[in-house]
Image: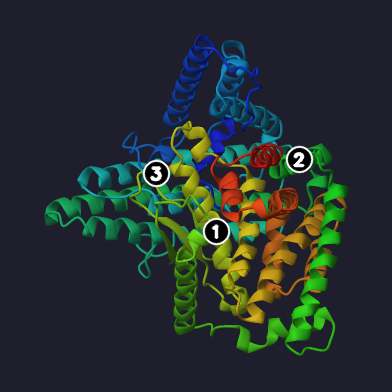
Amino acid sequence: MPFKTSKLVTVLAVLGTALVLPACAKEGPTKAQREIVETESDRLNAWFENRFDETVLRSPMSATRLGLDQQQDLLDDTSRLFKNETNALTETWLSELRRNFDPDRLDAATKLSYRLYEYAAEGSLEAARYDDHIYIFQHMSGPHTGLPAFMSNSHGVGNRDDALNYIRRLEQFGSFLAEQTAFAESQAKNGVLLPRFVYPKIREAAQNIVSGKPFEQTGESPLWKDISSKIDGLGLDSKISDDLMNGARNALMNHVKPAYDDVINMTIRHEAMADDNDGAWKLPDGARFYQSRLKHYTSTDLTADEIHQIGIDEVARIKSEMQVIMKDVGFDGATRQFFDKLRTDPEFLYENTDEGRAAYMEQATQVIAEMKAKMDDLFITTPQADMIVKRVEPYREASAFGAFYNEPSVDGSRPGTYYINLKDMNDLPIYQLQALAYHEGIPGHHMQIAIAQELKGLPRFRTLGGHTPYIEGWALYAERIPKELGLYTDPYQDFGRLSMEIFRAARLVVDTGIHAKKWTRAEAVEYMMENTANAEGDIRAEVDRYIVWPGQATAYKIGMLKIDALRTRAETELGEDFDIREYHDVILANGSVPLSILEELVSDWIARKKS
C-alpha cells in the first residue's frame, strides 16, 4: 500500500538524496586538505539548510506537518504562477550548487548530499514538463479530500490562537480550491480528462465533506465535528467558545460550502466531456509522459515493455512458491481455485460489523507489538518515535486507500500511524493481516521513515525527502523478513505474504498494460482475478487507482527486487561475514536514496567488509 507523503515531500522534489568515498593518496590527506574539506562541507550543509528553510517558508502546510510554529493561519499557494516560480527557483538553486561547490572538496556524506540534491532537482524539472498531465482531482486523492484530512490530522488546537488559525484556514478553502479547479479546467481544455467513471467518485467524496451540520439539520460534517471537538477540548470560557464556534460555522457556510459546490459542478461538466479510455496513452504525448512517470517511480530507465515482462516472470515464480503451501494445507487444485476459496470462504474474513472491525484492529495492533519486541534481531538502528494503529476516519473511507502510513512529526509530538480502512471487511482478509501490518508499520514504512527523520548530521532534505522505489521497495521487502524470525506460524498467513507479493508483481503487468498496451479496465481486472487472491472489490478499486496514478504501482516490486538482489550479492560475497543487521543499517542509515545510489552504498559496505 502506498505511503502517504506530506506536501513537503512533493515540494522537496526540488531537493534530493548518495555516498561515494573520495579516493585518497596512500599517505592520506594533509592537514590543510582536511581543513578545506571540512570548511567546504560545512558551507554546503549550511546552504542546504537555507534552501530547506526557504522551501518550507513557501509551504505553510508543510510547516504545520513538521510541527513548526510559523504561518499557521495560511494554506499553501497552489496557483500556476507559484508553480512556475518554484520551477524557476529549482533551476536557480541547481545552477548555484554546481557553480559554487566542488564535489571533490567535500567529505563523503556531503558529497552524497550534493549528488542527491542534484538528482532530485533534475527529476523535479523533468517532471515539471508534464505538470499538465498529472490529474489534480481524482478519486484516490486530491485537494477536496486532502484539505480536510490535513485540518483533522495536522492542525492541532492547543489554545485560542490555534483555533482562530484553524478558522482562518477554513476561510481560505475557497481560494485554495479555486486555484486547483482553474488548473483542472485548463487541463480539460487541453484534452487531459479522467476516464468518465472517476467523476462520480470525486463528487461523492466532495459531497461527504459538506453533508451534515452545519450545512444540514441532520448528521455532522467531518470538519464541523473536528473543530467542535478541538474547541471543546480547550475548556475555555463559554462566551469565547461560542464566538469560536460561530466563526467556524460562518467559515464553513460562506467559504467551504461554495468551494465544494464549485468542485462538484466542475466534475459534472468534465464528466460530460470525458470518454471511457483509461490509459496515459490517450493523453497528449502520452507515451513519453508515461515513460517519464516510470522513471520517476522506479528511478531506473526500464521501459514499459521491460517492466511488463519482469512482472510476468515474477508472477510465474511466486505462483510456484504458492503451490508448495497449497500442497502443505492439503489443497488439490489449480491456483485460481485456491484464490477463489480464499475470496469466498468466510473463515478468512472478520464479520462486516463493528465487532468484526474491532477484532481486526486488535489483532493488527498485536502483530505490531510482537514485531516491536523482535526489532533488535534485525536492526542496529531503531527509531525513537512510537507508532500506533488507527482506523481511517469514516468521512474519507470512500476515497482513502485500504491501508497506509503517516509519518511521525519531527518533534516527536505525533507518533507514526498505520491507518486501516475498515469500510468493508471483505477487502481485509485475515490471511493478509500480518503482511499488511509489516508493510505499513514495523518493520516496513515506520522503520524506514522514522529512522530517516531521526538521522543526525544530515541536511533535512535527506531526512525528510523520499524516493518511491526505495520507500515502497523497502516496505515490500519488509513483509518477508519477519518470516526469518518465525513470525509467520500459520501457513495461510505465509500464503498471505506471497499473495501480497504476487499482487505487486501483477501490478507491473497491469500498470504497463493499461498505460502502454491499451488494456481496458475489464482486461486489467480479469488479469488480477486470474493471478491474485484479492477480493474482486479490492481488485477493481486497485485497477481504478492505477488508471489515475500512472506508473506509481510499479515502484514496489522494482524496489524490492533491487534490495533483494543486493542482499543476495552481499550474502554470496561475504559468506559467514554477512550480518543481516549491518545490511539493514546500510539500507536505512543514509535516508532515502535512488536505487542506483543504493547499489553503490551496498558495494562500498561489501568492499569495506572484505578489506
Residue underneath mark 3: 410
Mark 1 secondary-structure assignment: loop
On screen, residue 465 versus residue 65, left or right, reads right
Q: Position of residue 396 (x, y in %)?
A: 50, 62
Horizontal side of 504 relative to 388 (left or right) equals right
Name which of mark 2 and mark 3 comes first in the sequence.
2
10 Å neighbourhood of mark 3: few (<14), some, or many (≥20)? some
User: For this view, does 157 lie left or right of residue 207?
Assistant: left
Residue visible at 71% across and 34% down? 130
Q: Is residue 480 above or below residue 257?
A: below
Q: CA distance from mark 2 to mark 3?
A: 30 Å
The x, y position of residue 260, in whole percent, is: 49, 51
Q: Amino acid at mark 3?
A: Val
Q: Residues within 10 Å of mark 2 (few under 14, many from 20)?
A: some
- Residue 172 occupies quadrant: top left
* Pointer 2 or 1: first along the chain: 2
Quadrant where the N terminus sits is bottom right
- Looking at the image, which residue is at 26% across and 45% down? 162
Q: Is residue 550 above or below residue 386?
A: above
**Residue that carries the numbered disc 1 in the rendered image:** 378
| Relative image position of residue 507 (x, y in whole percent) | 75, 59
Residue at 62% x, 17% y: name it: 104
Q: Which residue is mark 2?
A: 300
Q: Secondary structure at mark 3?
A: loop
Q: Amino acid at mark 2?
A: Thr
Check if mark 2's residue and mark 1's residue have beta carbons within 8 Å: no
Classify mark 1: residues with Cα within 10 Å, few (<14), some (14-19) or many (20+). many
